[in-house]
Amino acid sequence: KIKSLALAASLTLAVTMSVGAAHAQEVKHRIIRFGYGLNDISNQGRATKVFADEVEKLSGGKMKVRAIGGAALGSDVQMQQALIGGAQEMMVGSTATLVGITKEMAIWDTPFLFNNGKEADAVLDGPVGQKIMDKLQEKGLVGLVYWENGFRNLTNNKRAVAKLEDLDGIKLRVMQNNVFIDSFKTLGANAVPLPFSELFTALETKTVDGQENPFNTILSSKFYEVQKYLTVTNHVYSPWIVLVSKKYWDGLSKTEQKVLMDAARKSRDFERQDTRAEADKALADLKAKGMQINQLSPMEANRMRDKLSTVNAGIAANVGQPLWDEVQAAVKKARGA
Ligand code: TF8
């Protein structure tokens, strides 16, 4: 009798396991709405296409990514809310727009944190980058990978910005994020937070005088049509982050999750290469489009850096000193110091 009980138990176990395993491996027909803020011909659009193609390939055509650019599904902030609520499956957007949800994301807004892409990759893809990404889960978001938005540079319509004082009174659109508002207020500009989707019109109608974004975006969003001066400041490195709704993610099988993760990694590697190649020649393109370009001198960059040290202290206080220290140590390590 005991023997038959044991047999029954092990049979039940075997059946449960195989059902579980089948479920874990199942790939269903799915349509994934993937939103982003830039247009289709941007680096963001190109990498989204790579992601979509890879998901389709890895799932044998069962999982289809519907890429929806140009903020047609809403601004970064609106899409994040849709993901949390489960009304949208995926998106890519700036980490800076996530600070209201996960305060630790503000660490990536630290002015002059990275000197180059290699340092950024090492820190973002390393343990501390993962740790910060994982904090999103308790808020209903799953981060898959970081993409490169890039080093941000300043454009405006008032004057060539050659020194700190030239920023005085310039009405500058910034991302909806306290670190950016504080940074540019500290530098003397009149910082106005606006979603990216409203930026071109705000520049065109002169609601704001300027903005700051990587060369790639200044080019793909045609800001050169409505901005005269470009100052190469490289004041901060912006990551993008590929997000999945946690509600949606939790309903996927292990195999489906792996399809998304593998495709995200592939898109990341493509995106960084593509973005860097474009950035390398974008300045010449922008010049050819008629922008007046100047380089911020190292001395002026240092003056900015000094002024912004109060902002750094604020970030450290907000995210907690241990996390701040951990990121600093990771940067140091990436620098080989
Ligand atoms: C910005 C960002 C944008 C991103 C994008 C819409 O200035 O740099 O590139 O938020 O995903 O808002």
Image (tube, rainbow, N blue to C red):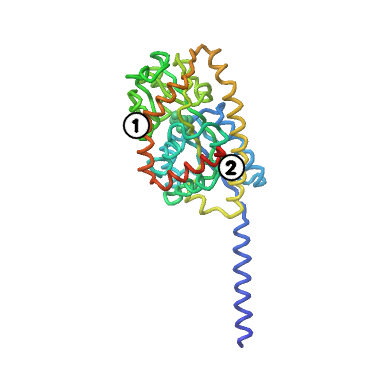
Label 2 neighbourhood size at 10 Å, few (<14), some (14-19), many (20+)? many
Residue 190 at x, y percent in the picture: 32, 23
Relative side of 220 to 318, left or right:
right
Q: Is residue 178 visible?
A: yes
Relative side of 143 to 58, left or right:
left
Label 1 secondary element: helix
Residue 235 at x, y percent in the picture: 45, 28
The residue shown at (51%, 11%) is 290
Q: Is residue 71 visible?
A: no
Q: Contact (CB < 8 A) between labels 2 and 1?
A: no
The residue shown at (33%, 19%) is 168
Question: Residue most toward the bottom?
Answer: 1
Relative side of 161 to 268, left or right:
left
Tell me the quarter of the image containing the C terminus.
top right
Please name whichever residue, 56 or 145, is drawn nearer the observer in this view of the structure.
145
The first of marks 2 and 1 along the sequence is: 1
Residue 225 at x, y percent in the picture: 47, 15
Amino acid at pointer 1: Asp
Residue annotated with mark 1: 182
The residue shown at (50%, 36%) is 240
Relative side of 54 to 243, left or right:
right
Label 2 secondary element: helix
Answer above or below: position of 20 versus 68. below
Residue annotated with mark 2: 264
